Every structure is written in C-alpha cells, then in structure tokens.
Amino acid sequence: MRIIMFGPPGVGKGTQAKLLSEEFGVPHISTGDMLRAAVAAGTALGKKAKSIMDAGRLVPDDVMIGIVREVLTSPKVQNGFILDGFPRTVDQAKALATLFDELHIRNYKVINFHVDNAEIIRRLGSRLMCVNDGNIYNKLTDGVTAESPCPECGGKLIQRDDDKEETVRKRLEIYHSTTKPVLEFYKERGVIVQLDGMTSIESVHEEIKQLVGA
Ligand code: AMP
C-alpha cells in the first residue's frame, strides 16, 4: 500500500490515513504531525516552523523534502506508507518523484479528496486537538467539547492556532494557488483516483479501500 492523500486542509486526509494505517499496519506519515511534534519538543525545526504554521503558510520546500527523504529511506516504510500533507508544491512533487525513482517505487496512488469549501470551513472550525498526543477530534462527530478531556489520554483539547477562521481561509488560498497545481503533475502520470469526501467517515474509508484495491 503506497498512497498519497491529496486535497485541501480539513477534507479528512488525516482521519482516513489513520484508519487505513490501523487496519493495514502501514505507517501514516503526516508532515503536519511531524512539524507539530517538533514545535512541541522545541527543536530548531520546531522554532523555525511555528510562526509559519500559525500563519497558515508553507514551510520551505528544502526543509520538507529533507524530512520526507529521511522517513521514506527508513526501514519502517518497507511495506508501504500513507503520505498525508506531502507533497504540497510542484517542487515537492518533483523531489518525491526523484526519490521514488531512487527507491524503485513505481506503484502508488494519489487519492484526491473532494469536499466543498463551506463544509471544510465548518469541519475545521469545530476541530479540536489534544495538547498531549496530538489526536484530532471534532465537536460535530466525536461528542467532545472544548471542556472535555482527550478521550484517549485525558489531555486538554484545544483549537489549533491554524484552525482559526482567518488562518483557514489563508490555508485554502495557498492550497488553490500552490498545492492544487500538483494534480497536473500526477495527472500526467495517471496515478490519481478521485474520492468523494462529503459522506461519512466509515463510507469514505470503504470507498478508499475499493479505490486502492485493499
Ligand atoms: P497539516 O496538518 O497537514 O494541515 O499541516 C499543518 C501545517 O504544517 C501546514 O499548514 C504547513 O504550515 C505545514 N506543513 C505540513 N506539511 C507541509 C508541506 N508538505 N510543505 C510545507 N508546509 C507543510
């Protein structure tokens, strides 16, 4: 299973990647989660990334490509991977293609999530993250509120700075100007499958399994 989850923020890429990862034992590689872990740990990368992320902008390509290269060349991805949040620019997609060539990776699919803008803003506006384990919950579907403890570890649930409405709008703008053109790159390679992300978490999960033949 080699999958790239593609689409704007808030379409369910992380949720679906996690479900697939649990069911098939394939690592979920989320560049956003890796950056948030670096911010929480106060590393040099975290210090550099924090203000960029809070503003809804993109961390520089060379940094992101370096991070992804390190993970994809490690033994833990031998049996596959689910990439979530990368590539986000055409240069990242080109660097990933070079890396795939080096690693002799030919079979992979790009799942293109479709969710309309109003629904994205609604979902992101009601999303909460645990400060401890980084798990994401949604007030609309998970029965949590900003006052509840994390259902898994009891940690505090907060709204991510980049899920505030103004930042969401910025992230969507950057998606349309900078990330969406990546689809052209993959169209030429014939690796895209289209996914309707507007239905329930369970039915989207089933649809993905059909699309990738899992
Ligand atoms: P995500 O959790 O995937 O929405 O990512 C959160 C934030 O991390 C993004 O808004 C960016 O600031 C940063 N980020 C994550 N992945 C990338 C990437 N591939 N390229 C640039 N910035 C990224």
Image (spheres, rainbow, N blue to C red):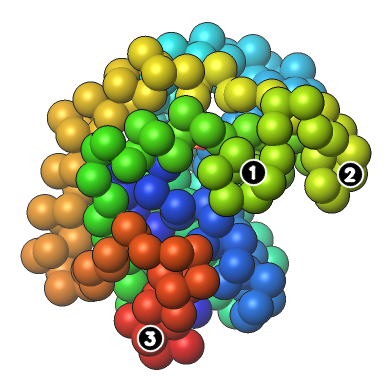
- Label 3 Cα crowd, 10 Å radius (few <14 / some 14-19 / many 20+): few
User: In this figure, which residue is indicated by the disc labeled 2?
Assistant: 153
Residue 137 has which mark? 1
**Relative height, residue 3 to residue 144 (above, below):** below
Q: Position of residue 1 (x, y in %)?
A: 49, 79
Q: Which residue is mark 3?
A: 210
Residue at 84% of width from left, 49% of height from top? 152
In terms of secondary structure, where does tag 2 sit? loop
User: Which residue is outermost to the bottom?
Assistant: 213
Q: Nearer the viewer, residue 153 or 47?
A: 153
Q: Residue at x 57, y 50 (%)?
A: 141
Element marked by disc 3: helix
Of the residues shown, which amino acid type is indicated by label 2?
A: Cys
Is residue 134 left or right of 182 when viewed as pictured? right
Q: Position of residue 48 (x, y in %)?
A: 57, 14
Q: Compared with residue 3, is residue 122 higher up or lower down, i.e. above or below?
A: above
Q: Earlier in the sequence, mark 3 or mark 1?
A: 1
Residue reaching furthest to the right: 154
